[in-house]
Amino acid sequence: MKLKFAFHAAAALAFCAQVSAQTKWDLPAAYPASNFHTENLTQFASDVDKATGGKLKIQVHANASLFKAPEIKRAVQGGQAQIGEILLVNFQNEWQIFGADGLPFLADSYDAAMKLWRAQKPLIEKKLGEQGMMVLYAVAWPPQGIYTKRTLNSAADMKGLKWRAYSPATARIAELVGAQPVTVQAAELSQAMATGVVDSYMSSGSTGFDTKTFEHIKNWYDTQAWLPKNAVIVNRAAFNALDKATQDALLKAGASAEARGWANSRKANAETLDKLKANGMSIIAPSATLKADMKKIGDTMLKEWLEKAGPEGQQLVDAYRKL
Protein backbone atom coordinates (compact mmCIF):
# COMPACT_ATOMS: atom_id res chain seq x y z
CA MET A 1 0.00 0.00 0.00
CA LYS A 2 2.82 2.36 0.95
CA LEU A 3 4.55 1.52 -2.32
CA LYS A 4 1.39 2.26 -4.28
CA PHE A 5 0.97 5.59 -2.46
CA ALA A 6 4.59 6.50 -3.12
CA PHE A 7 4.12 5.73 -6.82
CA HIS A 8 1.02 7.95 -7.06
CA ALA A 9 2.76 10.72 -5.13
CA ALA A 10 5.75 10.55 -7.49
CA ALA A 11 3.42 10.63 -10.51
CA ALA A 12 1.60 13.64 -9.10
CA LEU A 13 4.89 15.44 -8.47
CA ALA A 14 6.03 14.66 -12.01
CA PHE A 15 2.76 16.02 -13.41
CA CYS A 16 3.08 19.21 -11.35
CA ALA A 17 6.65 19.67 -12.56
CA GLN A 18 5.46 19.21 -16.15
CA VAL A 19 2.67 21.78 -15.71
CA SER A 20 5.00 24.29 -14.04
CA ALA A 21 7.52 23.83 -16.85
CA GLN A 22 4.90 24.70 -19.45
CA THR A 23 5.20 28.27 -20.75
CA LYS A 24 2.26 30.11 -22.34
CA TRP A 25 2.70 33.03 -24.69
CA ASP A 26 0.09 35.37 -26.17
CA LEU A 27 0.46 36.37 -29.83
CA PRO A 28 -1.76 39.34 -30.83
CA ALA A 29 -2.41 39.70 -34.58
CA ALA A 30 -4.40 42.34 -36.45
CA TYR A 31 -5.96 40.28 -39.24
CA PRO A 32 -8.85 37.77 -39.48
CA ALA A 33 -8.32 34.10 -38.64
CA SER A 34 -8.94 33.25 -42.31
CA ASN A 35 -6.18 35.57 -43.60
CA PHE A 36 -3.10 33.73 -44.89
CA HIS A 37 -0.84 35.57 -42.42
CA THR A 38 -2.97 34.43 -39.47
CA GLU A 39 -3.23 30.88 -40.79
CA ASN A 40 0.57 30.88 -40.97
CA LEU A 41 0.78 32.09 -37.36
CA THR A 42 -1.55 29.28 -36.28
CA GLN A 43 0.62 26.71 -38.07
CA PHE A 44 3.73 28.26 -36.50
CA ALA A 45 2.19 27.98 -33.02
CA SER A 46 1.29 24.34 -33.69
CA ASP A 47 4.84 23.62 -34.91
CA VAL A 48 6.30 25.15 -31.73
CA ASP A 49 3.91 23.11 -29.55
CA LYS A 50 4.93 19.86 -31.28
CA ALA A 51 8.66 20.63 -31.39
CA THR A 52 8.77 21.48 -27.67
CA GLY A 53 6.53 18.62 -26.56
CA GLY A 54 3.99 21.13 -25.26
CA LYS A 55 6.55 23.08 -23.20
CA LEU A 56 5.83 26.30 -25.10
CA LYS A 57 2.23 27.01 -26.03
CA ILE A 58 1.47 30.09 -28.14
CA GLN A 59 -2.10 31.42 -28.26
CA VAL A 60 -2.86 33.42 -31.43
CA HIS A 61 -5.37 36.26 -30.89
CA ALA A 62 -6.64 37.17 -34.38
CA ASN A 63 -8.42 40.24 -35.77
CA ALA A 64 -7.06 42.77 -33.24
CA SER A 65 -9.00 40.99 -30.47
CA LEU A 66 -6.23 41.43 -27.87
CA PHE A 67 -4.52 44.62 -29.05
CA LYS A 68 -5.24 46.92 -32.02
CA ALA A 69 -2.64 46.92 -34.80
CA PRO A 70 -0.77 50.09 -33.68
CA GLU A 71 -0.63 48.82 -30.06
CA ILE A 72 0.98 45.42 -30.69
CA LYS A 73 4.61 46.55 -30.87
CA ARG A 74 4.37 48.42 -27.57
CA ALA A 75 2.60 45.44 -25.96
CA VAL A 76 5.47 43.11 -26.91
CA GLN A 77 8.10 45.64 -25.85
CA GLY A 78 6.40 46.09 -22.47
CA GLY A 79 5.88 42.37 -21.92
CA GLN A 80 2.06 42.50 -22.03
CA ALA A 81 2.40 40.00 -24.88
CA GLN A 82 5.50 37.86 -25.33
CA ILE A 83 5.24 37.72 -29.13
CA GLY A 84 3.22 39.60 -31.74
CA GLU A 85 2.74 40.28 -35.44
CA ILE A 86 3.11 43.86 -36.67
CA LEU A 87 2.83 45.61 -40.01
CA LEU A 88 6.24 47.27 -40.26
CA VAL A 89 5.08 50.32 -42.23
CA ASN A 90 2.73 51.25 -39.35
CA PHE A 91 5.80 52.38 -37.40
CA GLN A 92 7.55 54.58 -39.98
CA ASN A 93 7.01 57.74 -37.93
CA GLU A 94 8.93 56.13 -35.06
CA TRP A 95 11.85 55.13 -37.30
CA GLN A 96 11.95 55.62 -41.07
CA ILE A 97 13.53 52.22 -41.84
CA PHE A 98 10.32 50.50 -40.69
CA GLY A 99 8.59 52.18 -43.66
CA ALA A 100 11.02 51.21 -46.43
CA ASP A 101 8.77 48.47 -47.82
CA GLY A 102 5.85 50.90 -48.10
CA LEU A 103 7.60 53.19 -50.59
CA PRO A 104 5.83 52.93 -53.97
CA PHE A 105 7.84 51.08 -56.63
CA LEU A 106 11.05 50.75 -54.60
CA ALA A 107 10.40 46.97 -54.44
CA ASP A 108 7.38 46.01 -56.53
CA SER A 109 7.69 42.23 -56.94
CA TYR A 110 8.13 39.25 -54.63
CA ASP A 111 11.78 38.82 -55.63
CA ALA A 112 12.49 42.52 -55.09
CA ALA A 113 10.61 42.48 -51.77
CA MET A 114 12.72 39.57 -50.53
CA LYS A 115 15.92 41.45 -51.50
CA LEU A 116 14.67 44.50 -49.62
CA TRP A 117 14.00 42.33 -46.57
CA ARG A 118 17.55 40.94 -46.72
CA ALA A 119 18.89 44.52 -46.73
CA GLN A 120 16.42 45.76 -44.10
CA LYS A 121 16.65 42.87 -41.61
CA PRO A 122 20.07 43.64 -40.00
CA LEU A 123 18.99 47.23 -39.34
CA ILE A 124 15.65 46.11 -37.88
CA GLU A 125 17.33 43.46 -35.73
CA LYS A 126 19.62 46.14 -34.29
CA LYS A 127 16.78 48.60 -33.62
CA LEU A 128 14.51 46.01 -32.01
CA GLY A 129 17.47 44.74 -29.96
CA GLU A 130 17.91 48.24 -28.52
CA GLN A 131 14.21 48.17 -27.61
CA GLY A 132 14.39 44.82 -25.83
CA MET A 133 12.95 42.78 -28.70
CA MET A 134 13.99 40.55 -31.58
CA VAL A 135 12.52 39.82 -35.00
CA LEU A 136 11.64 36.18 -35.60
CA TYR A 137 10.49 36.32 -39.22
CA ALA A 138 8.71 38.47 -41.80
CA VAL A 139 6.27 37.76 -44.63
CA ALA A 140 5.24 40.07 -47.48
CA TRP A 141 1.68 40.94 -48.36
CA PRO A 142 0.67 40.56 -52.01
CA PRO A 143 1.31 43.58 -54.30
CA GLN A 144 -0.76 46.68 -53.60
CA GLY A 145 -3.35 48.08 -55.99
CA ILE A 146 -6.03 50.79 -55.87
CA TYR A 147 -9.63 50.09 -54.85
CA THR A 148 -11.99 52.79 -56.07
CA LYS A 149 -15.52 53.33 -57.37
CA ARG A 150 -14.15 55.75 -59.97
CA THR A 151 -12.56 55.13 -63.35
CA LEU A 152 -8.90 56.14 -63.05
CA ASN A 153 -7.05 57.22 -66.18
CA SER A 154 -4.51 59.33 -64.32
CA ALA A 155 -3.60 60.42 -60.79
CA ALA A 156 -5.71 63.57 -61.34
CA ASP A 157 -8.82 61.35 -61.23
CA MET A 158 -8.01 60.52 -57.58
CA LYS A 159 -8.57 64.09 -56.41
CA GLY A 160 -11.20 64.33 -53.66
CA LEU A 161 -11.39 60.59 -52.93
CA LYS A 162 -12.06 59.63 -49.29
CA TRP A 163 -8.90 57.57 -49.04
CA ARG A 164 -8.23 54.97 -46.36
CA ALA A 165 -4.70 55.41 -45.00
CA TYR A 166 -3.08 52.67 -42.91
CA SER A 167 0.49 54.02 -42.82
CA PRO A 168 2.39 57.30 -43.20
CA ALA A 169 3.15 56.36 -46.83
CA THR A 170 -0.50 55.75 -47.78
CA ALA A 171 -1.45 59.04 -46.09
CA ARG A 172 1.25 60.84 -48.10
CA ILE A 173 -0.04 59.34 -51.38
CA ALA A 174 -3.43 60.87 -50.59
CA GLU A 175 -1.84 64.28 -50.03
CA LEU A 176 0.12 64.08 -53.29
CA VAL A 177 -2.95 63.20 -55.42
CA GLY A 178 -5.36 65.56 -53.61
CA ALA A 179 -7.40 62.84 -51.87
CA GLN A 180 -8.62 63.05 -48.25
CA PRO A 181 -6.68 60.60 -46.05
CA VAL A 182 -8.66 58.85 -43.30
CA THR A 183 -6.79 56.53 -40.90
CA VAL A 184 -8.59 53.18 -40.77
CA GLN A 185 -7.10 49.89 -39.54
CA ALA A 186 -7.90 46.60 -41.33
CA ALA A 187 -10.29 45.38 -38.61
CA GLU A 188 -12.45 48.51 -39.08
CA LEU A 189 -12.29 48.79 -42.88
CA SER A 190 -15.57 46.99 -43.73
CA GLN A 191 -17.54 49.33 -41.46
CA ALA A 192 -15.70 52.40 -42.81
CA MET A 193 -16.73 51.49 -46.37
CA ALA A 194 -20.31 50.62 -45.36
CA THR A 195 -20.78 53.99 -43.64
CA GLY A 196 -19.11 56.02 -46.40
CA VAL A 197 -16.15 57.09 -44.25
CA VAL A 198 -13.87 55.90 -47.09
CA ASP A 199 -14.53 55.17 -50.75
CA SER A 200 -11.05 54.16 -51.89
CA TYR A 201 -7.76 52.71 -50.65
CA MET A 202 -4.58 50.93 -51.67
CA SER A 203 -4.04 47.36 -50.55
CA SER A 204 -3.72 43.78 -51.73
CA GLY A 205 -6.33 41.45 -53.17
CA SER A 206 -6.10 39.57 -49.90
CA THR A 207 -7.30 42.54 -47.81
CA GLY A 208 -9.99 43.29 -50.39
CA PHE A 209 -11.42 39.79 -50.08
CA ASP A 210 -11.06 39.64 -46.27
CA THR A 211 -13.05 42.86 -45.89
CA LYS A 212 -15.63 42.06 -48.62
CA THR A 213 -14.67 45.25 -50.42
CA PHE A 214 -16.57 43.95 -53.47
CA GLU A 215 -19.82 44.75 -51.61
CA HIS A 216 -18.96 48.47 -51.78
CA ILE A 217 -16.32 49.01 -54.50
CA LYS A 218 -16.10 47.34 -57.90
CA ASN A 219 -12.72 48.45 -59.36
CA TRP A 220 -9.22 47.34 -58.40
CA TYR A 221 -6.31 48.83 -60.36
CA ASP A 222 -3.40 46.37 -60.36
CA THR A 223 -0.58 48.89 -59.87
CA GLN A 224 1.69 46.40 -58.01
CA ALA A 225 3.10 49.40 -56.18
CA TRP A 226 4.77 47.75 -53.18
CA LEU A 227 4.64 44.65 -50.94
CA PRO A 228 4.54 45.66 -47.26
CA LYS A 229 5.64 43.07 -44.72
CA ASN A 230 4.27 41.72 -41.48
CA ALA A 231 6.98 40.88 -38.95
CA VAL A 232 6.69 38.58 -35.96
CA ILE A 233 8.56 40.11 -33.02
CA VAL A 234 9.46 38.61 -29.65
CA ASN A 235 10.12 40.12 -26.24
CA ARG A 236 13.84 39.42 -25.63
CA ALA A 237 13.44 38.78 -21.87
CA ALA A 238 10.69 36.23 -22.57
CA PHE A 239 12.92 34.53 -25.16
CA ASN A 240 15.90 34.51 -22.78
CA ALA A 241 13.75 32.85 -20.11
CA LEU A 242 13.27 29.78 -22.34
CA ASP A 243 15.70 26.87 -22.16
CA LYS A 244 18.10 26.41 -25.09
CA ALA A 245 16.15 23.54 -26.69
CA THR A 246 12.92 25.59 -26.64
CA GLN A 247 14.70 28.64 -28.05
CA ASP A 248 16.11 26.53 -30.89
CA ALA A 249 12.67 25.05 -31.61
CA LEU A 250 11.14 28.54 -31.73
CA LEU A 251 13.81 29.84 -34.13
CA LYS A 252 13.45 26.79 -36.37
CA ALA A 253 9.65 27.10 -36.47
CA GLY A 254 10.07 30.81 -37.29
CA ALA A 255 12.37 30.05 -40.24
CA SER A 256 9.85 27.51 -41.55
CA ALA A 257 7.01 30.02 -41.10
CA GLU A 258 8.89 32.64 -43.10
CA ALA A 259 9.49 30.29 -46.07
CA ARG A 260 5.91 28.99 -45.93
CA GLY A 261 4.48 32.50 -45.51
CA TRP A 262 6.12 33.91 -48.64
CA ALA A 263 4.91 30.93 -50.68
CA ASN A 264 1.41 31.33 -49.22
CA SER A 265 1.44 35.04 -50.06
CA ARG A 266 2.04 34.30 -53.74
CA LYS A 267 -0.73 31.72 -53.65
CA ALA A 268 -3.11 34.07 -51.79
CA ASN A 269 -2.46 36.79 -54.38
CA ALA A 270 -3.69 34.63 -57.27
CA GLU A 271 -6.55 33.05 -55.31
CA THR A 272 -7.97 36.25 -53.81
CA LEU A 273 -7.92 38.10 -57.14
CA ASP A 274 -9.91 35.20 -58.64
CA LYS A 275 -12.35 35.39 -55.71
CA LEU A 276 -12.73 39.16 -56.13
CA LYS A 277 -13.53 38.66 -59.84
CA ALA A 278 -16.08 35.96 -58.94
CA ASN A 279 -17.77 38.51 -56.67
CA GLY A 280 -18.06 41.14 -59.39
CA MET A 281 -14.81 43.07 -58.94
CA SER A 282 -13.10 44.36 -62.10
CA ILE A 283 -9.33 43.73 -61.98
CA ILE A 284 -7.93 46.47 -64.21
CA ALA A 285 -4.44 46.99 -65.60
CA PRO A 286 -3.53 50.67 -65.00
CA SER A 287 -3.17 52.94 -68.03
CA ALA A 288 0.31 54.08 -69.08
CA THR A 289 -0.56 57.56 -67.76
CA LEU A 290 -1.71 56.28 -64.37
CA LYS A 291 1.40 54.10 -64.09
CA ALA A 292 3.68 57.03 -64.96
CA ASP A 293 1.87 59.30 -62.49
CA MET A 294 2.17 56.74 -59.68
CA LYS A 295 5.86 56.23 -60.49
CA LYS A 296 6.43 60.00 -60.15
CA ILE A 297 4.69 59.88 -56.75
CA GLY A 298 7.00 57.00 -55.80
CA ASP A 299 10.08 59.00 -56.84
CA THR A 300 8.90 62.00 -54.78
CA MET A 301 8.25 59.82 -51.74
CA LEU A 302 11.61 58.05 -51.99
CA LYS A 303 13.38 61.43 -52.13
CA GLU A 304 11.41 62.65 -49.08
CA TRP A 305 12.06 59.39 -47.24
CA LEU A 306 15.82 59.53 -47.85
CA GLU A 307 15.91 63.09 -46.49
CA LYS A 308 14.18 61.91 -43.29
CA ALA A 309 16.01 58.58 -42.98
CA GLY A 310 19.44 60.14 -43.55
CA PRO A 311 22.63 58.05 -44.00
CA GLU A 312 20.92 54.95 -42.55
CA GLY A 313 18.23 55.13 -45.25
CA GLN A 314 20.79 55.65 -48.02
CA GLN A 315 22.78 52.68 -46.69
CA LEU A 316 19.65 50.51 -46.87
CA VAL A 317 18.73 51.56 -50.43
CA ASP A 318 22.34 51.09 -51.61
CA ALA A 319 22.56 47.64 -50.00
CA TYR A 320 19.21 46.65 -51.54
CA ARG A 321 20.20 47.79 -55.04
CA LYS A 322 23.43 45.80 -54.89
CA LEU A 323 21.60 42.52 -54.20
Image: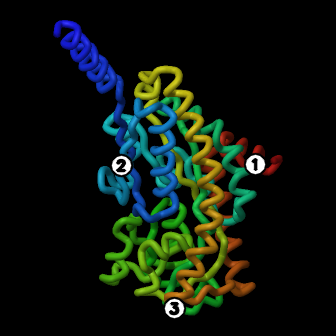
Q: Which amino acid does label 1 sit on?
A: Tyr
> What is the quadrant of the N terminus in the image?
top left
Question: On screen, 46 above or below 224?
Answer: above
Q: Which amino acid does label 2 sit on?
A: Glu
Q: Which of marks 3 and 2 is in front?
A: 3
Question: On screen, 208 above or below 82?
Answer: below
Residue 254 in the image, given as x and y percentages of width and height: 56, 41
Residue at the (49%, 75%) spot, across then down: 208
Residue 129 in the image, given as x and y percentages of width and height: 52, 30
Q: How crowded is mark 1: few (under 14 residues within 10 Å), some or many (20 or more)?
A: many
Q: Distance between the residues labelled 3 and 1?
A: 38 Å
Q: What residue type is labelled 3?
A: Gly
Q: In this view, does 28 lie to the left or right of 313?
A: left
Question: Which residue corresponds to mark 2?
Answer: 71
Q: How far apart are marks 3 and 2 (CA)?
A: 35 Å
Which tag, 3 or 2, sits closer to the chain's start? Answer: 2
Residue 288 in the image, given as x and y percentages of width and height: 75, 85
Q: Residues within 10 Å of mark 2 (few under 14, many from 20)?
A: some
Residue farthest toward the left in the current orientation of the protein = 1
Question: Which residue corresponds to mark 1?
Answer: 320
Residue at the (65%, 65%) spot, across then down: 266
Residue 299 in the image, given as x and y percentages of width and height: 70, 65
Residue at the (46%, 87%) spot, across then down: 217
Question: Which residue corresponds to mark 3?
Answer: 280
